[in-house]
Image (cartoon, rainbow, N blue to C red):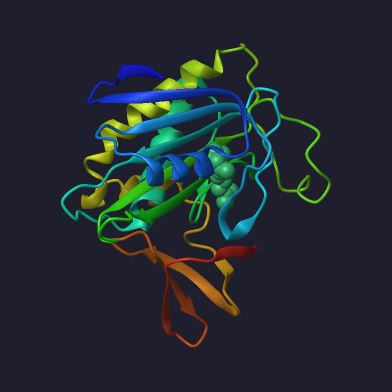
Amino acid sequence: IDHYRTTTMPVAIHTFRSISSTNDYAKQFSSSQDFEEPQVFVADTQTKGHGRLGRHFYSPIDGGIYLSILIPLQNRQTIHSGLITTGTAVCVVRSLKRFFPNEDFRVKWVNDILVHDKKCGGILTETISSLEDGLHENVIVGIGLNINSANFPSAIAHKAGAIVNNTSIDKNRIAASIIDHFFYMYQTYASGNFLQEYAKLSETLGKKVQVVMGNQTITGFADHFTGDGALVIKEDSGQMVTVSSGEVTKVYL
Ligand code: BTN
């Protein structure tokens, strides 16, 4: 474990060559010990990386970033997880922009990072109630980025993309920048102030979309985001529907 001082607070960093999933490890860590400072788990490769909706997250060894941030929430503080995910998406794009200023990164609601219209990264936010009182919640924010990855499994090849690191920037520098920026921004997540920036980066807003939420499919115009990061869709009938989780499965051009 390394102790590391971000611009805004001290954190403990655990690094791994290979791990099943940094999110799963963080979950286990969170339920097996007490800790006061945030813990960060970073791995070079994962054997069971996963994303939202129980999907696999392709995590090979060739340069990707796979990390999870575990934050102890004290005093029954709660933050809407939609705000953590959208805020982290803005944070990741801001950091990537510093290293890859010529790339046009976009965000697909709610947690996908896109480059050249393909998914190059994702965010998985999970909350865990503590065993003692079931009330204090810890939050785990997992961030995965494909950098220089190729040979995507055929099932995802048509939609997966990678950030091309031509100048061989050390990926640990990028990860450090994301971690630093995360803690800087985290304190303001609850305010939702970043949502305007999120909307500007959004690939979803202003388009006709289809969103699948559980066994429900909603089709309509992606109109705006609510103050907690949910998407409001205007159906053809004029009815406004708010979706707080789900996946945009289709964009009509
Ligand atoms: C998604 O695409 O739905 C989210 C992907 C999140 C992937 C990251 S990689 C590090 C962390 N560990 C995991 O198992 N998942 C997240």
157 relative position to 85: left or right: right
Tally of numbered discs: 0
Image quadrant of ligand 1 equals top right
Seen in the picture, residue 86 relative to 187 is either above or below; the reply is below
Give the position of the C terminus as an image quadrant: bottom right
Residue 192: image location, x then y, percent = 26, 52
Foreground residue among 138 and 234: 138
Q: In which quarter of the image is residue 136?
A: bottom left
Foreground residue among 2 and 247: 2
Residue 240: image location, x then y, percent = 41, 80
Q: Residue furthest right?
A: 154
Residue 66: image location, x then y, percent = 55, 32
Residue 115: image location, x then y, percent = 60, 38
Foreground residue among 241 and 21: 21
Q: Quadrant of residue 119?
A: top right
Q: Residue furthest bottom?
A: 237
Seen in the picture, residue 135 relative to 6 is either above or below; the reply is below
Seen in the picture, residue 197 relative to 104 is either above or below; the reply is below
Query: Is residue 236 visible in the rendered structure shown here?
Result: yes
Query: Is residue 101 visible in the rendered structure shown here?
Result: no
Seen in the picture, residue 54 relative to 223 is either above or below; the reply is above
175 relative position to 63: left or right: left
The residue shown at (56%, 27%) is 43
The residue shown at (38%, 36%) is 91
